[in-house]
Image (cartoon, rainbow, N blue to C red):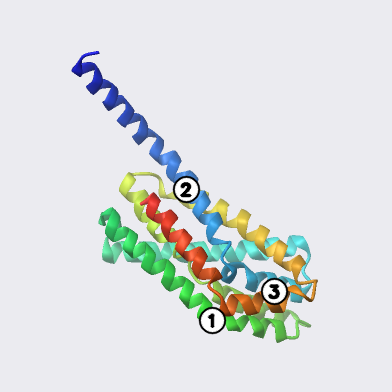
Amino acid sequence: MNNESLILIGQSEGMSLRDMSPMLILILSFLAGAVQMIAPDRWIPLSVLSWRSRWSDSNTIGFSSLTFGMHLLLGVALFFALENTLKLSQYGPFPLTLFAGSVILGGTAFRMKRFSRVRSILSAPFDSPSSTAWGGVTAIGLLGPSEVLIPVLAKTLQMGASPVSVILAFTMGTLIAGNLMVGLGRRAWDRPFWLPRVLEVVQRDTSALTVAVGLILGVGFLL
């Protein structure tokens, strides 16, 4: 095999890898959306609200999906605001990874600092629509925007992939994993042993931080 043939083979392999990149980023976006929902600060407030309000499974899924959708829409809006000012899509891999680490750790720290407000959901008398609505606003406020989506979208623009497809893949991962975690938590709280211990562990432990570090490593691989 001559040198010219080797060059052609190398070029064809490179083209194949580039062709696979959009599909790869969709798969990784789905996984990133799913993994972020493992962090207790993302699903415990909604599971506690559903449990205290005695919602049905369909009502729980509906409200959780709406809340997670708002969580993602805020993340998309925040990304485009940052893109217009900081031009994130023009960052190199290392600066973008540093930025991703900063926003993920910052978002996690913000939610954990406000996590004590979950106890206000526990103590509220959910005997009227207004009190349930207040609990919903509290849960949404605890969740905030999806900071994990920001570096993923920056990488998407760098690769020339479709932001809409990536947002949809990320959303699917978020909704599937998020509703699963909320449903499992809601059933666990029926057993008096679990809820106080989980809240205690989350507030004193580094469980959310551990997930955040894992997300940073995963997003860093993507970037």
* Front residue (pair 42, 81): 42
Q: Where is residue 131 in the image (x, y as percent from the top left)?
A: 70, 83
**Which three-letter amino acid code belongs to the residue tagged 1?**
Arg
Classify residue 162 as left or right of residue 203: left
List the residue tagged with mark 2: 28
Sooner in the amino-acid sequence: mark 3 or mark 1: 3
- Image point (32%, 63%), residue name: 98
- Image point (41%, 40%), residue name: 22
- Image point (75%, 76%), residue name: 52
List the residue tagged with mark 1: 114
Q: How would you rate the neighbour count of disc 3 (Cα within 10 Å): few for under 14, some for 14-19, many for 20 or more?
A: many
Q: In the rendered view, would you say 210 is above or below 119?
A: above
* Front residue (pair 218, 28): 218
- Image point (80%, 71%), residue name: 190
* Front residue (pair 178, 160): 178
Q: Can residue 201 be seen in this view?
A: yes
List the residue tagged with mark 3: 48
Q: How far apart are marks 2 and 3 (CA)?
A: 30 Å
Q: Position of residue 174 (x, y in %)?
A: 56, 57
Classify residue 1 as left or right of residue 104: left
Sooner in the amino-acid sequence: mark 1 or mark 2: 2
Q: Distance between the residues labelled 1 and 2?
A: 29 Å
Mark 1 element type: loop
Q: How would you rate the neighbour count of disc 1 (Cα within 10 Å): few for under 14, some for 14-19, many for 20 or more?
A: few
Q: Where is residue 221 in the image (x, y as percent from the top left)?
A: 39, 51
